[in-house]
Each structure stands twice: as structure tokens, then as C-alpha cells.
Image (cartoon, rainbow, N blue to C red):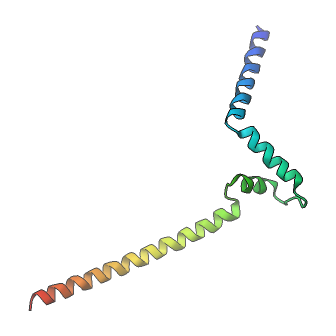
């Protein structure tokens, strides 16, 4: 029975390895680790290096994007208020011009 369980565990590992290979994970990880190995000055944060190499935003990028998002949301709010004010002025002008 133990042999069957061991074989089952091994086949699961083998299936997972094949899955990683088919999906390109092993190749991508190999390339990033080789790039890190060949880096003349090792980065202080290896995980950020790996994220950046793979195209994911780093923690600094995320903070900058959050700040930019907040700034853009405020700008949208300001512009929406301006549009509302201009629309009301235009409506008032059209009403007074139509009444003459």
C-alpha cells in the first residue's frame, strides 16, 4: 500500500513538473535566476529584481501608481464640478435668451 501511495505522490509531482514546463514557468524562472546570477552588482532586494525582470510592479511602483490614481481621481472630481457649473450656466443663458 505504501508503494502505491509513493507512486501516486511521485506521479503528482511529475504531472506538476510537466505542467510548469508546458506553461513556460521553468524557462522563465531559469532565465530570471541566470540574469540575477550574471548581475555584476547584486541588487539589495532580489525579490524586487525578479518581479521587475518578470514585468510585475515593485512595491515602489505600486505606491507611485496609488498616488497618481488619487491625484487623477481628484482631477476628475474637479472637472466634473466645473462641467456641472458650466452646464448650469449654459442652461440659464439658453432659458434667458429664449424668453426674450
Q: Residue at x 83, y 52 (%)?
A: 35
How far from the left and from the top, in percent, is residue 19?
A: 68, 30
Q: Is residue 24 above or below residue 55?
A: above
Does residue 65 appear left or right of residue 13 in this picture? left
Nearest to the observer: residue 79 or residue 25: 25
The single residue placed furthest to the left in the displayed view is: 100
- Quadrant where the C terminus sits is bottom left
**Quadrant assignment, res 92:** bottom left
**Residue occupying the point 79% across, 49% down:** 32
Q: Is residue 70 left or right of residue 13?
A: left
Q: Relative to residue 22, is residue 50 depicted above or below? A: below
Identify the residue shown where x is 68% and y is 33%: 22
In the rendered image, residue 25, in percent from the top left (x then y), is placed at: 71, 39
| Tally of numbered discs | 0
Q: Residue furthest bottom?
A: 100
**Percent from the top left, x then y, of residue 59?**
69, 61
The furthest residue to the top: 1
Residue at point 84%, 48% (across, down): 34
Q: Quadrant of residue 48?
A: bottom right
Q: From the viewer's perspective, tell me whether residue 59 is left or right of residue 65.
A: right
Position of residue 11 measured from the top left corner of the image (x, y, whole percent): 73, 19
Where, quadrant-wise, is the N terminus in this rendering?
top right
Amino acid at each position: 500500500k505504501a508503494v502505491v501511495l509513493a507512486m501516486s505522490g511521485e506521479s503528482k509531482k511529475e504531472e506538476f513538473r510537466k505542467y510548469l514546463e508546458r506553461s513556460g514557468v521553468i524557462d522563465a524562472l531559469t532565465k530570471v535566476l541566470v540574469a540575477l546570477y550574471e548581475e555584476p552588482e547584486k541588487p539589495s532586494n532580489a525579490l524586487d529584481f525578479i518581479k521587475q525582470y518578470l514585468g510585475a510592479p515593485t512595491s515602489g511602483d505600486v505606491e507611485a501608481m496609488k498616488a497618481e490614481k488619487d491625484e487623477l481621481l481628484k482631477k476628475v472630481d474637479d472637472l466634473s464640478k466645473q462641467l456641472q457649473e458650466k452646464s448650469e450656466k449654459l442652461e440659464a443663458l439658453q432659458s434667458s435668451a429664449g424668453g426674450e
